[in-house]
Image: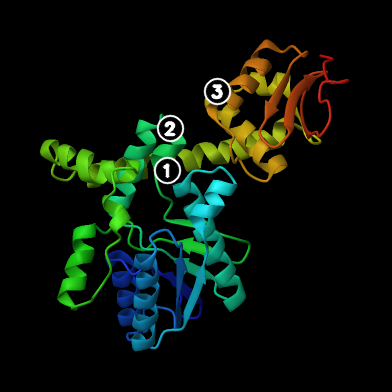
Amino acid sequence: MSIGTDVSLIVAVSGGADSVALLDALLRLRKHNQAPRTILAAHLNHQLRGEESDGDENFVREMAATLDVKMIVDRIAVGARAQAERQNLEAMARRLRYEFLTRAAEECGAQVVCTAHTLDDQSETVLMRLLRGTGTDGLRGIHSIRPLSKTVNLIRPLLSVSRAKVIEHCTHYKLEFRSDSSNFLPDFTRNRIRHELMPLLYSFNPRAEEALARMADFSANDQDFLGQVAVGMLAEVRLGPDLDAQLLRKQPMAIRGRVLRLWLREHRDGLERIGAVHLGAIEQMIARGQGGRVIELPGGWRVWLKSGRLKIAQFSGNPRLGLSES
């Protein structure tokens, strides 16, 4: 993936082998005018592993100083935030990390953020989603590029590079890196997939991670096409802020579900905490074509059917008053 030399770029550096190798590779490419002239590094101390987390931060600071790379660092007590908001620790860490990277990029005027996700991360993500019962959209795995904000894009240049190749790069150039002890804890699903399931899959196919990545690529192509169809269909079934339930009912389920997700995302500014049970309930209401029921969504949002229109609104009081007419 080509990145213009006239942009500013931030590399997310944890101190691990993947991110150290990515930063090193970009700096080497810059010497040959094949990478942006302005490369910065960013590190978020999650404060989850005490002295080890602080050691990671100090390591990255020293490395950046040695390489003469500007360093952006922040510290967030992720565990306390997750507990206070009653959120999954991994999900909270991921959310706060990308919020930090977006903020850092916007404050520095950088247009691109690079993370060091590898081919192994891709295969582990696909397997993790399969085990959770993902829909076909989840099979696309990690996106190689996606927007973080209106002005910042996230790019993952190593997504087709194996972790073994990353270690080989570090060994060849004698690059030091840190090892995260939490990567070996059996408490996290990803760790068990990495250390238990993937070795078993290698016994069936020594290139299992490549096979899973190929499946993710095929799925991404399909999802992109179906997504474009859904965007066009959303425009057809719009009735102001509502949807034409009768016209939507006639669409194939694959398109109808995508239209609903697009519509919910617009109104709720995202699909956070929206699960299959919510979408299934809305689908069922559309199929029956009858009002009299209110589908309650996280955050006080409600969806209901009235006069052939699918409606959505956020309520703080009694949502059922005046909403049950079909």
Is the residue 66 above or below the residue 117 in the image?
below
Q: Could you tell me which residue is drawn at 51 percent across and 36 percent down? A: 226
Q: Residues within 10 Å of mark 3 (few under 14, many from 20)?
A: few
At label 2, which amino acid type do we have? Thr
Viewer-proximal residue among 168 and 30: 168
Q: Which mark is residue 56?
A: none
At label 1, which amino acid type do we have? Asn
Q: Which mark is residue 134?
A: 2
Is the residue 108 above or below the residue 148 in the image?
below
Image location of residue 94, percent across then percent down: 48, 54
* Residue designated by label 1: 221
Badge 2 marks a residue whose secondary structure is: loop
Mark 2–mark 3 distance (CA, rounded to whole Å): 16 Å
Q: In the picture provided, is 37 more to the left or to the right than 284?
A: left
Count all numbered tags in the image, as a single digit: 3
**In the rendered view of the protein, which quadrant contains the N terminus?**
bottom left
Sequence-wise, the earlier of marks 1 and 3 is: 1
Sequence-wise, the earlier of marks 2 and 1 is: 2
Image location of residue 178, percent across then percent down: 28, 68
